[in-house]
Image (spheres, rainbow, N blue to C red):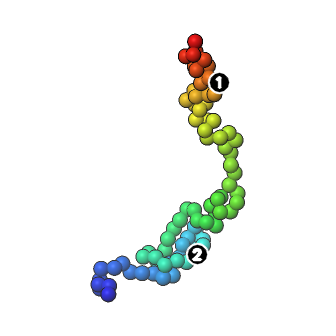
């Protein structure tokens, strides 16, 4: 059994606001919640997300740190001489 007077007040119909507009109601310990992003305007959920990565992450890492295939094979040839 829960102890009295130690738990915060529960609001079963707390309103969630985004850009001054009520977007949903949830249960919360606060009567109002103000958010910047929610699933209704997030690019991932709305399908408007654009993928800009045109080259792979591994290739970009190798180019950045000088670990390209051509340079690596050249070092092996020098060691074999």
Query: Is residue 71 at all visible to an observer of this figure?
Result: no
Vertical relation: 59 (above or below) 11: above
Vertical relation: 54 (above or below) 50: above
Q: Report the residue at 68% width, 55% height from top.
A: 49
Q: SS class of the residue under badge 1? A: helix
Is 30 left, or right, of 41 in this rendering? left
User: Furthest-bottom residue in view?
Assistant: 1
Q: Decide which of 62, 50 is in the foreground and name it.
A: 62
User: Furthest-front residue in view?
Assistant: 80
Q: Report the residue at 32% width, 85% height from top.
A: 2
Vertical relation: 58 (above or below) 19: above
User: x, y percentage for residue 35?
Assistant: 53, 65
Vertical relation: 43 (above or below) 74: below
Q: SS class of the residue under badge 2? A: strand
Q: Report the residue at 58% width, 35% height from top.
A: 61
Image quarter hosting the N terminus: bottom left
Residue identified by numbered label 2: 24
User: x, y percentage for residue 77?
Assistant: 60, 17
Residue identified by numbered label 1: 70
Q: Decide which of 29, 61 is in the foreground and name it.
A: 61
Image quarter hosting the C terminus: top right
User: x, y percentage for residue 43?
Assistant: 65, 58
Crowding around mark 1 (Cα neighbors within 10 Å: few <14, some 14 to 19, many 20+) is few
């Amino acid at each position: 059994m829960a102890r009295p007077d130690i738990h915060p007040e529960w609001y079963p119909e707390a309103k969630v606001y985004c850009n001054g507009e009520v977007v949903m109601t949830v249960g919360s310990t606060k009567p109002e919640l103000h958010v910047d992003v929610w699933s209704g305007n997030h690019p991932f959920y709305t399908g408007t997300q654009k993928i800009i990565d045109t080259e792979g992450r591994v290739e970009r890492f190798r180019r950045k740190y000088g670990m390209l295939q051509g340079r690596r094979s050249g070092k092996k040839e020098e060691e074999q001489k």
